[in-house]
């Protein structure tokens, strides 16, 4: 279960704070939390994100360029519209396979089970890429600490499902 082993944004931020305290304050390299976070974020993480073999371009993806180039085009819209009823059925069937049915949202576990079920990972597409297609298709969530916010942050509505399919199509062509 992918969601059980993942930090929420709040938990991730708390983990960063704890790392900053351990690496910089407890050993005397920084005198306060602000300074320690600056060392951690600017010194340590920035080099990993922007340096050689940078992770930034691979992980932190602005969804707007993809959406503009591939999703918000008339031919793509036409393909989705022509198959809208079938796509909605597929979405609801996947959601019905678990607790997602009551939410009318697709969890990452249901998404990955769907991709495995249609044998999408037998070729060059990896499970990591399937997970990234899901992650990059999520909408922005204002407050993931509420129950509804958590669901919005970790699941896809039907429109997000369509975007994830478009991302898969781009990767597999």
Image (cartoon, rainbow, N blue to C red):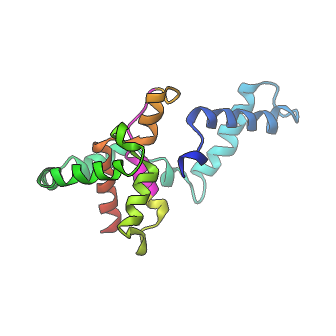
User: Is residue 22 depicted above or below 167 in this figure?
Assistant: above
User: Is residue 76 depicted above or below 12 in this figure?
Assistant: below
Q: Give the x, y percent position of residue 57.
A: 48, 52
Residue 1 in magenta stretch: no
Q: Nearer the viewer, residue 162 or 107?
A: 107
Q: How many marks?
A: 0
Q: Give the x, y percent position of residue 8.
A: 57, 37
* Direction right: furthest residue: 27
Q: Give the x, y percent position of residue 53.
A: 58, 60
User: Is residue 154 depicted above or below 162 in this figure?
Assistant: above
Q: Residue at x 83, y 31 (%)?
A: 25
> Is 54 on the left-hand or right-hand side of 64?
right
Q: Residue at x 74, y 26 (%)?
A: 33
Q: Give the x, y percent position of residue 52.
A: 60, 58
Q: Nearer the viewer, residue 25 or 131?
A: 131
Q: Nearer the viewer, residue 167 or 63?
A: 167
> Is 144 on the left-hand or right-hand side of 53?
left
> Is 53 on the left-hand or right-hand side of 171?
right
> Is 73 on the left-hand or right-hand side of 146?
left
Quadrant hosting residue 105: top left
Q: Residue at x 30, y 56 (%)?
A: 165
Residue 140 in magenta stretch: yes
Quadrant that contains the C terminus:
bottom left
Q: Which residues are magenta?
A: 131-142
């Amino acid at each position: 279960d992918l969601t059980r082993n993942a930090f929420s944004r709040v938990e991730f931020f708390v983990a960063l704070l704890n790392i900053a305290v351990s690496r910089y304050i407890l050993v005397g390299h920084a005198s306060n939390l602000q300074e320690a976070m600056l060392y951690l974020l600017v010194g340590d993480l920035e080099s990993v994100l922007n340096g050689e073999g940078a992770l930034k371009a691979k992980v932190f993806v602005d969804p707007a360029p993809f959406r503009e180039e591939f999703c918000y085009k008339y031919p793509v819209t036409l393909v989705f519209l022509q198959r809208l009823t079938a796509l909605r059925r597929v979405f609801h069937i996947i959601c019905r396979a678990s607790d997602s049915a009551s939410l009318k949202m697709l969890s990452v576990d249901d998404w990955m089970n769907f991709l495995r079920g249609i044998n999408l990972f037998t070729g060059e597409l990896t499970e990591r890429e399937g997970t990234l297609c899901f992650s990059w298709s999520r909408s922005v969530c204002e407050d993931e600490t509420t129950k509804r916010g958590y669901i919005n942050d970790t699941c896809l509505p039907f429109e997000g499902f369509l975007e994830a399919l478009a991302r898969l199509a781009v990767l597999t062509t």
